[in-house]
Image (cartoon, helix red, strand yellow):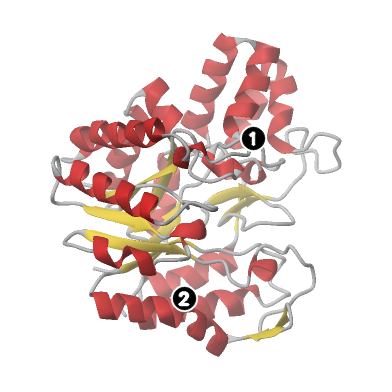
Amino acid sequence: MRLKGVNLGSWLLMEGYILGGRNIAESIFKQNFKKTNGTAALCEFERLFRDNFIKEEDFKNIAQMGANCIRLPFNYRLIKTNGLSYLKKALMLADKYDIGIILDLHAAPGAQNCDWHSDSTGKALFWEKEKFRKETLQLWEEIVSKVKEEPALIGFDVINEPVLDQKPTSILTKFYKEAIECIKAIDKKHTIFLEGSLWAQRIDFLRDLIEENVSISIHTYQPLDFTFNFVPFYKFPGKINNEHWDADKMRKYLEPYFLFSKDNKVPIFVGEFGINWRGGFWGELNWLEDILKAFDDFGFNYTYWTYKAVSGYVFPDGLYQYIQNSKYILREGPIHGWENYITNFQKEKNNILDFWQTKNFTPNNAIISKLKEHFKNEN
């Protein structure tokens, strides 16, 4: 069965832009919150956020789209502080609505890239210190041993978007080999997803790791300046960064991944793809149709990034968007988005809880309808 679904971003790992603000590491945000409000308030805030930002109704929404898969990003710190309770909750709700779950370690100990979404403060220490890699293997051993019997479980996305910088790929292949061995020592049934280097774009060096129940994962947001709206007024199809992008260009970009899949007899899972929505006036639906058709023609599995987000001007936003302004977004500044929780939480707690509810987010029916078409397509 082909996997087709969505990512539940910014639930078990918080991302600034998804919550309407600047992209700082989650740990930095929480340090600032704790400094202002104290440890007890931070614990309460985290619990209330996770209990309210995504709820059972959201799993029902995803099932009604025809999706059969959720990629669930999480921060390793969540497991350290809360155990597996939220992973178990997600697996239980997914099972209720007949959806599978891929557990995605989005932020590993030490950070596997330099970006905010790995909870990094600017360094990828995962590759500098072996202790972080060992800690990650131990983390997966704990998770796998306790969720392997969950009926909704599809598998384990070992680390999100590794970026090696100047390090040789051998350091990543060695880690992946150890991860495969440690996971399969506990669970030989579920799929292990290995992401390519350079934000899950380069995969040729992974061919020697392919074996039963191993899938190769890529992420694609090309052309980035268009999909992320880093350069306003680009249109698809059209000339973007001095190249003409259309359906044929999209297929040519993705074809090497298809050939890799065919030559190595391994499935390709597109763990992330998505687009910043500008009302549909700049060819966003054209891009989405062309990339989805290519995925279907090439037999790729995929999950859209992301399910729910504050509507913003850059980066891919949600299938459910918060469009209005509020004191918890404050698009006019000087402080934007989630950092406003820090100063408002104690006196505005109930209003913030209501703000997080999906009922206040507007469904992007154009993108949802397009995904529905392809979710039901059996190709």
Asked whether, in this view, residue 180 is left or right of residue 132, the answer is left
Q: Name the quarter where the N terminus is drawn.
A: bottom left
Q: Residue at x 51, y 37 (%)?
A: 125
Q: What amino acid is at disc 1?
A: Phe
Looking at the image, tell me whether mark 2 or mark 1 is earlier in sequence order.
Answer: 2
Alpha carbon of mark 2 to alpha carbon of mark 1: how far? 32 Å
* Residue beneath disc 1: 355
Asked whether, in this view, residue 190 is left or right of residue 128, the answer is left
Image location of residue 369, percent across then percent down:
51, 69
Say whether residue 66 is visible: no
Q: What amino acid is at disc 2?
A: Leu
Image location of residue 345, percent across then percent down:
67, 20
Q: Which residue is drawn at 40% across and 75% down?
A: 257
Determine whether the residue tagged by mark 2 lies in a helix, strand or loop: helix
Task: Please tell me whether residue 266 is drawn above or below residue 54 in the rendered image.
Answer: below
Image location of residue 336, percent across then percent down:
77, 38
Residue 292 numbered tag: 2
Determine whether the residue tagged by mark 1 lies in a helix, strand or loop: helix
Observer-side mark, 2 or 1, equals: 2
Task: Please tell me whether residue 92 is drawn above or below residue 245 in the rendered image.
Answer: above
- How crowded pointer 1 is (Cα within 10 Å; few <14, some 14-19, many 20+) is rated as some
On the image, which quarter does residue 337 sit in?
Answer: top right
